[in-house]
């Protein structure tokens, strides 16, 4: 027969910690604590399978459940020596939901269940405290009526207020036992009036009502929303925990408290917690009374007068310390504990891994490894890679007040503050002055022409565009804070104002942006500077030892390349050469090339660009000395380099000494309806091979020079973007090889490979042929996502939000790789490419290269490296190590 | 040992007509004629395998070739009784290239090979004509030196001119034998001077030189270009035909001629040809002398004085008629013949299927089937589906003079002429007048707002955009001639002028466009109106009996639907509902919906659209009575319905009574960088389900009304565009089903299916799940091509041309489906969809649905139908029949 109910208590349990899927987090931990002999109030857990059954069978229960719940109650009765519904010695229970993942959206707890007009007297007698018993009964009716019967809790609060008014008192505690007895009667009458039935007196009826309420709450709107936001599948379901009540409010020898086994903000190994005498759990949280420190040391350090638990209940304290140490070793992690002392006896109510700051998490993991509690692999698995972001960027002081004026998307982490500027020119002007001002570049959206402005700004704020808009991608690449798509802001560029909710900011006004939350704040706010601890370096070292994949960085400037090396990148996986074209000196030559009437005109203009590109590459090669550098040929459509709008065109034409009409006509000719699917990538090299030839020459000559200067030979990887077949790749590769042959004929010795981006569905499908001549593949999953799903990332915000909100896609596919669609294309590319060339070097250089879930997928596919923005390199290193550990474990598992 | 050389002559041959791949077209036909006992000058063919060997082995020959060529020569010597190089009785040969496909780019023929200073005397003696012999020698040196030795032919023409000058004569024929003897000496001296070696005297050396020249010519630039333009693989190679010379210029009993077995312009069964007495083949073509008709009937009909072949050489004529009839029956097709009469003896030099007009092709095929020469299947296979276009549209009179002022892309077939108008408004104004003027709408490019102008225009001309630009697609759908992307034209909209090559046209000036060639012509030009013959209907009837797939049409207007039925469509495969939104009455409501602040505002505006949509659908259902109609929900992004530019916005705002600023802001909000990948398709229905609900209601209510009016129940297929998963499809399907349930609850009885477009790579990959709830798939291969290849069709022209020109893609993927990329996605979609739902209805509704090569692919995949524009329905019907025949044949073939 199916086992729907598992019991625990009295030093053993039918469940275990690893049965979280079935028992939920709370139920599994209660069982585990019972199993290892800790003092846990006895109880039982109704499994999440019942929840699944409940929804699959029109909200009904399995036949066997009734008997199993009764057996569970008998188990508790036997241990406690009390009986459910017994007038003399009543068993009271709490009923709590508990799902696999922590889910605050779920049902509230019901305490004191089992109380009725009879048992309340038994409780009074047992506790020797009638007021306590009636207050418990009053609270139970209120809680149960609200949670199970669906009455608004204001109804009861109003009745309580009226009772206090009648008595002329202010505090609940001022009501005496008679007042409470009357209030119970009033509550019951109200319930009957509102629901048409009397308040249930039969404890079993109460219990089944509570169980049904827990299962029903799995589908309440709050829970549904929470699951959606946290990507928790509906199919998981919830378990129900029924547990004997213990009371921390049975007088001066009773107490309740919470504790962490280590300091959650620093990770220091010191018991850290608070308690209250004669109180219930909610009183600690409610903040009416001030809790006292648990340890003497903390009491002294905090200058607290009230005694510590260590002083007040030394026996209990000693037992608690032992339990805490035991649990930490048992779980191999810092614990967050809840306990109650009932008349001098310690009861453990909850033990779970404690939340902590990233800094603390690193220290705890490294310390636990040092203490021999964890292996290095386990320590590496303890850290959430995404949390490292906190360490790498300045953040807003948690204690500072935040005057939020708008919220956009958290496009690039970290906080920044500065004066508002509305153009890149203004940004440069402000920063280049002697005063060294800090500015926030505020734009509707950015374009490649804004690169120089973004470079000097402390942060970027846009009113349009998503997580993968130009501003977001470039800012992340630069490691600069960015808030994008703050749609509530209205920019009047001409007027030079930023308006939000009736308030107007002008250029020069100071704002702060928090790229980790998407908030835009009024004025300057206190900041905390990042600091990389020794623990960080220790753990990252372990991660690197464990990883199979390498982590490279996407970088094109010397600054980015240096940051990449500092953060531990093992090379550059993507150098976007076009970013080198926007400098003032260069853009003129670029535009001359675009305006040239024929090949010889283009070659003339390209000759001017050659020295710039060569020197950029030489610098990169020198910084990355000893590490591979992958350089992508020119990718964006040429119109991105031309000015837009009549005024800008006129200015540029004037400056270049060309006819404005001609410039305008060329811009119009180059205009595209869908530039993402336009004249870009290798299509430029195919139409104008001289561009690819110039770039190849610049790369190779730079490699020669850098090799000569550093004495270390340079290995460069030339990458052809946007191919659809072997033929177009070969066309460009031939041009690159021809340049190399020419230089080699002059005596140069070159070490290079020519490979390609796999960023279009057709390229993935044709990977077998492409691998016949490409020497490496780099999966460009940004464009692959755009094309496979037909979603322009710059235009996605208005509809992709609906997709994610309505659960039509599991996650934003630009953040985490879409395994089922894009992922299959990548897998096809890997499989076919390696079928042709088993040792084919494979990497990924889209934004996904810095996303832990996507990195796990890359590990499963057997890629050789991931490449991401420099500031995500540590995250990727850690994620790569975790992926290696988990994938190895998965491989080791017996096949299903 | 490999057989590199195959001989023919004297009533037998080693080759056959079906050995075209090995022998080339010419060689295979010569062998076939020899085999069936026709009088063919003996010879041999060096196979195309030698060409393959030649290029694979550094331009060398297989070892065995030398001996085999010698054996071939001996074979010819034996039959002719002459010897190669013999001074008394020399064998002379012609050397011709001949590949699998007809290839005009290849090497010129060399005649009279084997002549030298000795053999020329033998020829003179044999022919009893020294002048003839020296003229032949002179021509041989000239031809050989040019073709084999690479000397410019002007060199020899100059020397010939000088010789005539010296003699004071004008015509070549005025030179006597001594003049020619001297000229031969001068020629030989010239060759020695230019090449450093004497003109080769050894016949074998001459022969090997010619063979090498044929093989080398396979890679000459003309041949490469021709192969590229005609998609002929380089790997095919060419064969070499060496054949005994026969002379039509050996006096008055010799002649040469060409003939068709039927009239190539009408298909009438009558021998149709011309000949010249005492002449060589090139003289017939050169046009110096007027050739005479072959039959008496033709001579009388043409009022020609010179005697016919029938009169002049009655014996030869009778033999020729018998040969012609035999060949036609043998090949089962009209033949194009070349013959020579040498001193009263008939020799056949060539027999091949004759080129003909489409009208003639239909008559020939139907007649041959009636004569029992062909089966109906064979007759159906005889017609090139694409050629039917000629019959369906007005065309420019072939006799008319064409003053071409520009050439664009042949975007939609047929010719049209009319006054230039530069806007849709002007087009409507001009046409709506009492005069009923004909106009050509001339635009830089068209947008959905131009639909009404395109509707009234006789033809459309754009200066930008490709074969699949908006103008091209819509024009083809309407069956209207269109020339797109005529980049040489410059439009000044403000000035109202069209300028090309210094000439300026104004609104009202008449031009003619030829959408079949892409030409733009000055002024009006004489036209020929289309006419569908009985033969057409007969053959199409046969085609429909043979086809497995059905052909539907893409249509949304009543006019298109009627045309579709007339052309034999078996339903509507794609009704694009948005095309119904642009009418003046409706666009206002559409815009109100877009501007609405909330759902209730949108519902109010949609309620106004409902009656329009319902009545449109009712009309369609009535016209298509008894046939299925597939209706696609709203697809384009909403910004397509808003005005662009400040002036237009101001006008519309004024007309709508809304704030221009608001309208402008909304237009800005909706602006997209890549609309193709933007907020469109089912994404609209997901964000605004009320739109899909209104459309579903309009469809179902129209079906009910049409069913009531016609008494025949309507089956409608509602199609959800642009899905990426089952989840988004289900979301929209639920809304549609809900509307249906509501109407059914009111007593209506509906017959409908909800299916989806598979037009994104992800949808193809997820087809297995999607087929769990979709009731049919329609492959939208336009968008699938755009996304799989990352090519925006509206922007493709500037780079796709490079791809096709450089052979990087086999064909324009928007014209013929890209089997290797897009095709694999479609195949995956078919396979996974049918794995879930074996009877899943599958169709295609992209432009490929009207392309014969793509239709063949659809047949191979087992699709149920193709859908194309109404004017391509006959083409698709024929192509579907051919595909069915060929695919069945392929299935029947033993597996390789």
Image (cartoon, coloured by chain):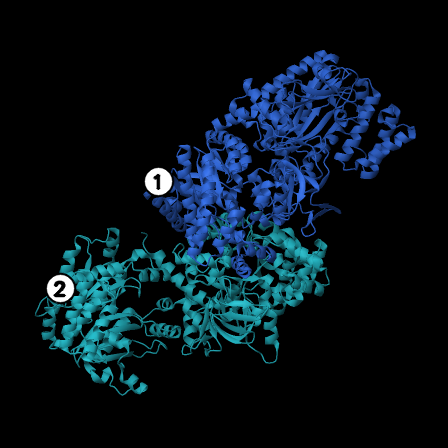
Chain colours: A blue, B cyan
Query: What mark, if any, has residue A748 been given in the picture?
Result: 1
Check residue A237 in the rendering and tell me which mark sits there, or answer none.
none
Q: Position of residue B402 (x, y in %)?
A: 43, 75
- Residue count near mark 1 (Cα–Cα under 10 Å), binned few <14, some 14–19, many ≥20: few
Which of B25 and A771 lies nearest the eye of the viewer? Answer: A771
In the displayed structure image, the side of residue A718 where residue B74 appears, left or right: left
User: Percent position (x, y) of residue A527?
Assistant: 67, 32
Please give the name of the residue rendered at 23% of the width and 64% of the height, measured from the top-left corner.
Answer: B151
Which class describes the residues within 10 Å of circle 2: few (<14), some (14-19), or many (20+)?
some
Mark 1 chain: A
Give the answer, above or below, for where A532 lies relative to A748. above
What x and y, as percent, mark residue B69? 16, 59
Q: CA distance from mark 1 to mark 2?
A: 52 Å
Tell me if residue A289 can be seen.
Answer: yes
| Secondary element at image label 1 | loop
**Does residue B782 lie above or below A525 as drawn?**
below
In the picture, residue A706 is in which quadrant? top left
Number of numbered tags placed on the structure image: 2
Label 1 vs label 2, nearer the camera: 1
Q: Chain of mark 2?
A: B
Q: Which mark is residue B201?
A: 2
Dividing the picture into quadrants, the one containing residue B282 is bottom left
Q: Is residue B779 visible?
A: no
Q: Nearer the viewer, residue A819 or B205?
A: B205
- B786 versus A708 height, above or below: below
Residue in the image at 52% along x and 43% along y: A820
Between A36 and B480, the one lying in front of the other is B480
Q: Is residue B260 left or right of residue A540?
A: left
| Image position of A716 (left or right of B368) | right
* B271 left or right of A571 in image: left
């Amino acid at each position: 027969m199916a086992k729907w109910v598992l019991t625990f208590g009295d030093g053993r349990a039918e469940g275990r910690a690893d049965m979280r899927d079935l028992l939920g987090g709370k139920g599994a931990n209660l069982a585990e604590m019972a199993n290892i002999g800790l003092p846990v109030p006895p109880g039982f857990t109704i499994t999440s399978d019942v929840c699944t059954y409940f929804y699959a069978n029109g909200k009904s229960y399995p036949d066997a459940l009734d008997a199993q719940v009764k057996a569970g109650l008998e188990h508790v009765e036997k241990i406690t020596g009390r009986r459910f519904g017994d007038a003399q010695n009543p068993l009271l229970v709490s009923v709590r939901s508990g799902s696999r993942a922590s889910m605050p959206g779920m049902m509230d707890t019901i305490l004191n269940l089992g109380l009725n007009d009879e048992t309340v007297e038994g409780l009074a007698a047992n506790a020797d405290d009638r007021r306590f018993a009636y207050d418990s009964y009053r609270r139970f009716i209120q809680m149960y009526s609200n949670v199970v019967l669906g009455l608004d809790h204001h109804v009861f609060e109003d009745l309580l207020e009226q009772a206090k008014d009648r008595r002329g008192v202010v505090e609940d505690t001022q009501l005496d036992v008679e007042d409470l007895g009357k209030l119970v009667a009033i509550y019951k009458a109200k319930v009957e009036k509102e629901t048409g039935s009397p308040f249930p007196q039969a404890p079993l009826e109460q219990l089944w009502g509570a169980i049904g309420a827990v299962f029903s709450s799995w589908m309440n709107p709050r829970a549904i929303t929470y699951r959606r936001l946290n990507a928790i599948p509906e199919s998981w379901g919830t378990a129900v925990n029924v547990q004997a009540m213990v009371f921390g409010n049975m007088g001066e020898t009773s107490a309740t408290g919470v504790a962490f086994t280590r300091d959650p903000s620093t990770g220091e190994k010191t018991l850290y917690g608070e308690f209250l005498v004669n109180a219930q759990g909610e009183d600690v949280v409610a903040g009416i009374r001030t809790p006292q420190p648990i340890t003497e040391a903390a009491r002294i350090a905090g200058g607290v007068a009230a005694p510590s638990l260590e002083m007040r209940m030394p026996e209990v304290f000693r037992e608690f310390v032992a339990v805490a140490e035991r649990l930490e070793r048992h779980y191999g992690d810092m614990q967050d504990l809840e306990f109650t002392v009932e008349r001098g006896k310690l009861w453990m109510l909850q033990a779970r891994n404690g939340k902590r700051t990233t800094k603390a998490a690193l220290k705890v993991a490294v310390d636990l490894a040092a203490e021999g509690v964890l292996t290095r692999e386990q320590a590496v698995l303890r850290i959430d890679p995404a949390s490292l972001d906190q360490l790498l960027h300045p953040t807003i002081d948690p204690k500072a007040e935040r005057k939020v004026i708008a919220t956009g998307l958290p496009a690039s982490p970290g906080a920044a503050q500065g004066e508002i500027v509305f153009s890149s020119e203004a940004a440069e002007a402000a920063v280049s002055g002697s005063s060294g001002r800090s500015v926030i570049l505020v734009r509707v959206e950015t374009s490649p022409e804004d690169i120089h402005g973004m470079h000097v700004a402390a942060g970027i704020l846009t009113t349009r565009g998503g997580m993968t808009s130009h501003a977001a991608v470039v800012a992340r690449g630069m490691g600069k804070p960015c808030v994008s798509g703050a749609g509530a802001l209205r920019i009047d560029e001409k007027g030079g104002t930023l308006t939000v909710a009736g308030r107007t900011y002008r250029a020069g006004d100071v704002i702060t942006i928090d790229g980790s939350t998407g908030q835009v704040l009024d004025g300057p706010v206190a900041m905390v500077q990042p600091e990389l601890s020794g623990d960080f370096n220790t753990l990252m070292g372990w991660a690197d030892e464990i990883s199979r994949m390498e982590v490279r960085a996407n970088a094109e400037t010397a600054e980015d390349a240096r940051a990449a090396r500092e953060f531990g990148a093992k090379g550059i996986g993507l150098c976007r050469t076009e970013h080198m074209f926007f400098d003032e000196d260069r853009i003129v030559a670029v535009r001359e090339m675009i305006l040239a009437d024929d090949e010889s005109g283009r070659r003339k203009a390209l000759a001017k660009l050659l020295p710039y590109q060569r020197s950029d590459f030489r610098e990169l090669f020198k910084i990355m000395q000893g590490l591979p550098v992958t350089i992508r040929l020119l990718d964006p459509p040429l119109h991105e380099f031309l000015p837009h709008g009549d005024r800008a065109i006129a200015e540029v034409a004037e400056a270049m000494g060309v006819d404005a009409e001609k410039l305008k006509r060329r811009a119009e000719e180059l205009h595209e309806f869908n530039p993402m699917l336009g004249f870009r990538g290798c299509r430029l090299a195919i139409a104008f091979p001289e561009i690819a030839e110039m770039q190849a020459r610049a790369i190779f000559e730079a490699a020669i020079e850098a090799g000569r200067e550093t004495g270390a030979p340079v290995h460069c990887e030339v990458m052809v973007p946007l191919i659809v077949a072997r033929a177009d790749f070969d066309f460009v590769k031939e041009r690159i090889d021809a340049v190399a042959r020419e230089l080699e004929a002059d005596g140069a010795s070159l070490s290079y490979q020519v490979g390609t981006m796999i960023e279009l569905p057709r390229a993935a499908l044709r990977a077998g042929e492409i691998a016949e001549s490409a020497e490496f593949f780099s999966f460009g999953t940004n464009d692959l996502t755009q094309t496979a799903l037909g979603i322009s990332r710059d235009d996605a915000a208005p509809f992709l939000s609906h997709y994610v909100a309505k659960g039509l896609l599991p996650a934003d596919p630009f953040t985490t790789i879409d395994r089922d669609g894009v992922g299959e294309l990548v897998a096809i590319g890997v499989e076919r490419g390696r079928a042709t060339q088993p040792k084919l070097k494979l990497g990924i250089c889209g934004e996904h290269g810095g996303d832990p879930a996507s990195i796990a997928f890359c590990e499963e596919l057997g890629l050789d490296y991931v490449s991401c923005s420099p500031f995500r390199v540590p995250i990727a290193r850690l994620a790569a190590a975790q992926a290696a550990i988990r994938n190895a474990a998965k491989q080791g598992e017996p096949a299903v």
